[in-house]
Amino acid sequence: MNPVDIALQGSFPSVMVPTREPVAPMSASGERLLIASNGVFLEINRPWVHLVRRLSSFDWRTPVPYGKAFERTDLLCGSVPPALVAQFASMARAALPNEIGAWIVWSAVTGAFRLVGLPSLSHGPAHLHYDRPLLHEGESLVVDCHSHGRSRAYFSSTDDRDDQHDVKFALVLGNCDRTPSVALRLCAKGRFETAGAAPEHWLAALAEEGA
Ligand SMILES: [Zn+2]
């Protein structure tokens, strides 16, 4: 193998899933492919989350004599404080009629969450561009929040493009002049898993903040 592919295999390895023991855990942040008897899986490791998702299954059954892999989601940071979601809702209302963005970040060093406002570069209704903020050592983006002003909350094609490469939750608040509508999804390297509803305790905090 040439040096480029050796580096690629180091940074994004393919791993056989063993038949008699679990696959060895990832030792650092990154991604790898798990080749299992029941398909090819993408494993994603971040300080705050660990995900395994099936990328594809095989066209016929017999040829891969490896062990099985299973999809999983481990939220290592614990649950996101509803107070920070409510704090973002109040920022979004103050910014009306403009849209606004913020990140909820989590520190693997302190275990604490905080809300980081995003300085917008161009700022106006239906128009939001920003620089990624500088985070403290050990902090990770967990929830990428933005508002849709007075329009409803949904994921636009621009949102899809913006969320393509990240591993994060994406949260949209709409109807920010009253108790906001909410759209929430988990973004995992181009896979979007939209939640049927936001967590109950987030909705309760938003209703209280909007009252
Ligand atoms: Zn949007």
Image (cartoon, rainbow, N blue to C red):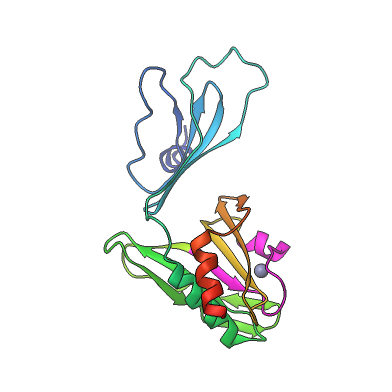
Q: Residue furthest left?
A: 110
Residue range of the region highlighted in magenta in the rendering: 143-162
Picture quadrant where residue 207 is located: bottom right
Kindly identify the residue that appears in the image at 72 percent across and 75 percent down.
Answer: 151
- Indicate whether residue 153 is drawn in magenta: yes
Residue 78 position in % (x across, y down): 38, 55
Q: Is residue 131 visible?
A: no
Kindly identify the residue that appears in the image at 57 percent across and 65 percent down.
Answer: 171
Answer with left or right where residue 125 lies relative to residue 209: right
Q: Is residue 210 visible?
A: yes
Which quarter of the rendered picture does the C terminus lie within?
A: bottom right
Kindly identify the residue that appears in the image at 27 percent across and 61 percent down.
Answer: 109
Picture quadrant where residue 180 is located: bottom right
Residue 65 position in % (x across, y down): 50, 14
Is 121 in front, or is 197?
Answer: 197
Answer with left or right where residue 87 lies relative to residue 164: left
Kindly identify the residue that appears in the image at 31 percent across and 59 percent down.
Answer: 108
In terms of image quarters, where does ligand 1 lie? bottom right
- Indicate whether residue 93 is drawn in magenta: no
Residue 191 position in % (x across, y down): 61, 48
* In the rendered image, the vertical position of residue 37 relative to residue 179, given as above or below: above
Is 175 in front, or is 168?
Answer: 175
Is 100 in front, or is 129?
Answer: 100
Q: Residue furthest top?
A: 62
Residue 51 position in % (x across, y down): 47, 43
